[in-house]
Amino acid sequence: MGVTCRAMMVAVAGVACSMALSATMSAQKASRTGAPEKGTWGGEVAVGDGQSASLLKFLSPQWAVVAGASISSYKSRFESGDVVLDDRFTLASLQVGARRYARTGLGVRPVVGGGLIVSGRTGNPNTYGVYGELGAVYFFNPHVSLGAIGTASVTRNNPVGSAFSASLARLIGAVYF
């Protein structure tokens, strides 16, 4: 009787451990692949080289349309002998594009994207061009992510000419609904 009772306890403990392990594995798998699904909307804020806010619409778990706005303020000073030049300006931009979130089977997903950008600077005419982005995002669950993305852009300002700009990675946080 003692052996049978002990065997039943071991069997029950084994089943309980198996169920707990299975539930844990399922939860881990869900959190690793917990990216937003098709039709999900998202709101994103970024800090780094200025501040920006974007709205995302997922067309699939890998592709999203991104529309955003950013604002940056710059100050520069040039000194040469008796000549001192101070320049302060604010740059505001609007961008619309597409972003691809690569599948990895983990919470971290590499990101690549690009699109069109229009920007204006105090005292200068508007510029227009294209931008690209590259980075990675970690999905804590299907509703929250944190990541870093670097951007580069080529813009055109008719009276002045073309310009290339790039920024190091900006910290990006997003919520999805």
Image (cartoon, grey):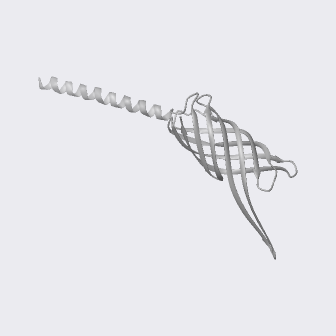
From where the camera sits, is residue 74 visible?
yes
- Indicate left or right for 14 with 51 as reference: left
Depth check, front residue: 120 or 78: 120
Q: Is residue 82 above or below residue 87?
A: below
- Indicate left or right for 78 with 37 as reference: right
Depth check, front residue: 72 or 142: 72
Where residue 126 sits in the image (x, y, percent)?
80, 48
Where residue 103 sits in the image (x, y, percent)?
58, 32
The residue furthest front is 123
From where the camera sits, is residue 101 visible?
no
Name the residue rendered at 20%, 24% in the picture. 8
The residue furthest right is 159
Depth check, front residue: 29 or 172: 172
Name the residue rendered at 72%, 47% in the picture. 93
Name the residue rendered at 86%, 52% in the picture. 160
Name the residue rendered at 62%, 33% in the picture. 57
How many marks the image carries: the answer is 0
Q: Is residue 46 above or below residue 56?
A: below
The residue furthest left is 1
Depth check, front residue: 1 or 22: 22
| Residue 134, image quadrant | top right
| Residue 81, image quadrant | bottom right
Where residue 90 sits in the image (x, y, percent)?
72, 56
Where residue 167 sits in the image (x, y, percent)?
68, 51
Q: Quadrant of the N terminus?
A: top left
